[in-house]
């Protein structure tokens, strides 16, 4: 168990795809630092492609993202953890303990795995077994008044996605919404979505919702049918933001 990932708290469901929640996800002292050092709103870039959200990352305002990491101890420590082999190992071992084997093998050299991947491609095969994985992350915000993320399944390069809610105990109520919905297409012809096309909320049946709670982490596996979304939130406060971190493990 690390400061930023209390895997013992993880509880999974497996249908229609593996997804679970940790409450809490992060050590209390580290979480308090995250709350106190959340980046200013003007550093974020508005990203309307998938809905109504703001992002600060290596792709969205990368210079500001790098400065926040460089100048803020808690984010510097968090960044170092996400980019470490120890992070990937910890997450993959936790998933394996929940009967989810994504083919991670600790200690596989990059050169050896590259050759294996080339040979597999030439033979028409595709597998994560023995693949090399790397972590990446971003800051994300959505307006509590109408902010949302449209139904999607994530890009094929993402293997695992985690989210961490970074909100104070007293600033959010269940009536606002903001939870992550597990979706199933109403039309079964659209269940297969490996390449991550978007859909409308009206196209989906909501099977379950992981409530947006302080220091709660949601983790799920990208699959062909990992449809998820955040429905439009219901606050009337124009200043309130749904703050969370997005952490990904990608195949490299």
Image (cartoon, rainbow, N blue to C red):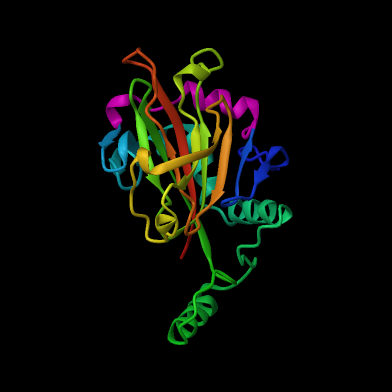
Residue toward you, 130 or 238: 238
Magenta residues, as a range? Answer: 23-43
Can you give x and y, in whole percent of width and height, for residue 245 in the image? Answer: 47, 36
Query: Is 30 situated left or right of 245 in this image?
Result: right
Q: Quadrant of residue 47 in the image?
A: top left
Residue toward you, 218 or 139: 218
Residue at (53, 72) in percent of width and height:
127
Residue at (70, 37) in percent of width and height:
9
Task: Give the vertical position of 208 relative to 109 (above or below).
Answer: above
Query: Is 90 situated left or right of 120 in this image?
Result: right
Query: Is 106 situated left or right of 140 in this image?
Result: right
Q: Is residue 28 magenta?
A: yes
Residue at (56, 39) in percent of width and height:
218
Task: Give the vertical position of 108 relative to 17 (above or below).
Answer: below
Q: Dividing the image into 4 quarters, which one contains the N terminus? A: top right
Q: Is residue 60 magenta?
A: no
Task: Give the vertical position of 183 relative to 130 (above or below).
Answer: above
Q: Residue furthest front?
A: 187
Q: Quadrant of residue 148 in the image?
A: top left
Can you give x and y, in whole percent of width and height, for residue 76 in the image? Answer: 48, 39
Can you give x and y, in whole percent of width and height, for residue 227 in the image? Answer: 46, 48
Q: Quadrant of residue 50 in the image?
A: top left
């Amino acid at each position: 168990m690390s400061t930023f990932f209390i895997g013992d708290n993880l509880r999974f469901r497996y249908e229609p795809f593996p997804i679970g929640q940790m409450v809490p996800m992060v050590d209390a002292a580290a979480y308090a630092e995250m709350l106190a050092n959340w980046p200013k709103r003007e550093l974020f870039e508005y990203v309307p492609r998938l809905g109504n959200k703001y992002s600060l990352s290596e792709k969205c305002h990368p210079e500001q993202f790098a400065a926040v990491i460089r100048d803020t101890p808690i984010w510097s420590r968090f960044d170092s953890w996400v980019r470490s082999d120890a992070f990937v190992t910890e997450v993959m071992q936790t998933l394996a303990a929940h009967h989810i084997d994504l083919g991670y093998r600790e200690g596989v050299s990059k050169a050896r795995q590259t050759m294996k991947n080339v040979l597999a491609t030439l033979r028409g095969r595709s597998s994560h077994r023995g693949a090399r994985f790397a972590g990446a992350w971003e800051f994300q915000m959505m307006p509590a008044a109408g902010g949302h993320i449209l139904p999607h399944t994530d890009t094929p390069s993402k293997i695992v996605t985690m989210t961490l809610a970074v909100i104070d105990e007293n600033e959010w109520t269940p009536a606002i919404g903001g939870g992550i919905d597990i979706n199933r297409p109403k039309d079964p012809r659209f269940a297969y979505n490996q390449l991550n096309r978007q859909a409308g909320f009206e196209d989906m049946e909501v099977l379950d919702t992981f409530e947006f709670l302080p220091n709660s982490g949601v983790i799920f596996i990208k699959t062909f049918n990992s449809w998820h979304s955040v429905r439009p939130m219901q606050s009337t406060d124009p200043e309130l933001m749904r703050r969370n971190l997005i952490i990904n493990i990608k195949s490299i």
